[in-house]
Each structure stands twice: as structure tokens, then as C-alpha cells.
Image: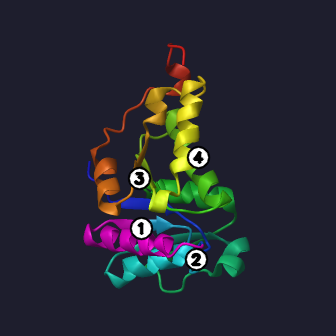
């Protein structure tokens, strides 16, 4: 089944390297060019805003989901196709997951990592079979990837579950990887084999 909506997790800050903003804008353009709807956190600041603006400027559709409590600090984007204001972070993440066929993480901080790890955990447990990816901008995720490989070597993550998280430096390449994923995995607790 072809992907239609992509959820992107990313920073509410721009970060120090201009490459982060450039990557967010490139991903936004690529989503719009491929006719893929963006689902994201709804803010107009940081990489979040640059990503949404790029999708909109290229004629794409953007759905933002923002908690009422963050409406001020993240400044809800007023130019989106649709902005949904929800009660809190749990509702935000659940709604973004509901509306999305795949997940991508751009560079970001604690919130970005927490959102990515939650949907990855859901996939590991068999709650969904939606593909996940890291857009590795300027080596941003290389240290994390090495650590994740270490968790496999140490016996805490099964190789098939580690393989659920795709990684690429180019937005088009990452989207191709996500499109190709079969969307099947043995849930962690159903796997009878040791890690």
C-alpha cells in the first residue's frame, strides 16, 4: 500500500548547523513533490516551522497537532491546511500516529527522541507496522546509531527490531526505504527465540 501521510518529528529550535534547516526544507519539498501529506507537531518555530513552510510553499498539505499548553511556546502555525489543538502530549502523539503511514525524525532534542522511541517501541510490540526512519543530517544521528547497534550486541534489542529503523542522509532515499518496507515484524513478546 503506498504511503500517503508522513509524520515528522523534529526540533522546535533550528540548531547550530544551517544544514539542519536545509534538510528540513528539502524534506518538505520532497514530501510535497511526491504528493505526501505532512503530519507534525503544529508549531511555526524552529525546524518544525521550516519543514511545514517548505511543504506549503511547494503546494503540499500539512496537518499540525499541538497541545493547548504548547500553543504559546511553540506558537501554533496559522497557515496550515489544518491545525488541531489537543489536550496534552499523549493526545498529540496518539493523533499524529493515527493520521500517519510512516514516521521520520529530523534532528531535534528530547521531544523528538521521545516521540521517535515511543512509535518505535509500539512497532516492536506489534501495535503497528508503520515504517520508521532517521534523516541523518550532517552525521547528527551517527552516535545514536552506534549506541543502538551496541544495544543489539549487548542482547537488549533483537536485530529485526533494530532493522525497523531505517537511516539515510537524503530525503528521497529515506522515503524510498520507507516505501519499500514490508511492514511486518515479529512482536517482541511473541518471539520465542532469545535475543
User: Which mark, by number, is residue 117?
Assistant: 4
Image x and y of residue 129, in percent: 42, 40
Q: Nearer the viewer, mark 4 or mark 1?
A: 4
Sequence-wise, the earlier of marks 3 and 1 is 1
Q: How much space separates mark 2 and mark 1, taking CA atoms?
A: 16 Å
The C terminus - image quarter: top right
Sequence-wise, the earlier of marks 4 and 2 is 2
Q: Nearer the viewer, mark 4 or mark 3?
A: 4
Sequence-wise, the earlier of marks 4 and 3 is 3
Q: Looking at the magenta stretch, what is its main secondary structure?
A: helix
Near-viewer residue (52 or 113)? 113
| Helix, strand or loop status at disc 4 | helix
- Which residue sits at x=54%, y=41%? 146
Q: Which residue does the numbered mark 2 point to in the structure image? A: 46
Reply above or below: 63 against 171: below
The answer to if 20 sits in the magenta stretch is yes
Q: How much space separates mark 4 and mark 1, taking CA atoms?
A: 19 Å
Q: Which residue does the numbered mark 1 point to in the structure image? A: 38
Amino acid at each position: 500500500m503506498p504511503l500517503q501521510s508522513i509524520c515528522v518529528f523534529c526540533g522546535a529550535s533550528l540548531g547550530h548547523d544551517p544544514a539542519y534547516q536545509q534538510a528540513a526544507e528539502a524534506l518538505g519539498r520532497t514530501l510535497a513533490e511526491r504528493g505526501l501529506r505532512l503530519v507534525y507537531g503544529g508549531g511555526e518555530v524552529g525546524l518544525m516551522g521550516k519543514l511545514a513552510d517548505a511543504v506549503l510553499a511547494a503546494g503540499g498539505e500539512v496537518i499540525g497537532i499541538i497541545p493547548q499548553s504548547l500553543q504559546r511556546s511553540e506558537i501554533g502555525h496559522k497557515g496550515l491546511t489544518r491545525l488541531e489543538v489537543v489536550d496534552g502530549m499523549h493526545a498529540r502523539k496518539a493523533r499524529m500516529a493515527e493520521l500517519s503511514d510512516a514516521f521520520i525524525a529530523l534532528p531535534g532534542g528530547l521531544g523528538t527522541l521521545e516521540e521517535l522511541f515511543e512509535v518505535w517501541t509500539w512497532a516492536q510490540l506489534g501495535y503497528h507496522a508503520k515504517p520508521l526512519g532517521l534523516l541523518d543530517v550532517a552525521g547528527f544521528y551517527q552516535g545514536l546509531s552506534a549506541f543502538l547497534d551496541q544495544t543489539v550486541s549487548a542482547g537488549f534489542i533483537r536485530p529485526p527490531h533494530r532493522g525497523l529503523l531505517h537511516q539515510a542522509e537524503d530525503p528521497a532515499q529515506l522515503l524510498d526505504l520507507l516505501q519499500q518496507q514490508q511492514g511486518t515484524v515479529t512482536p517482541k513478546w511473541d518471539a520465542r527465540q532469545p535475543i
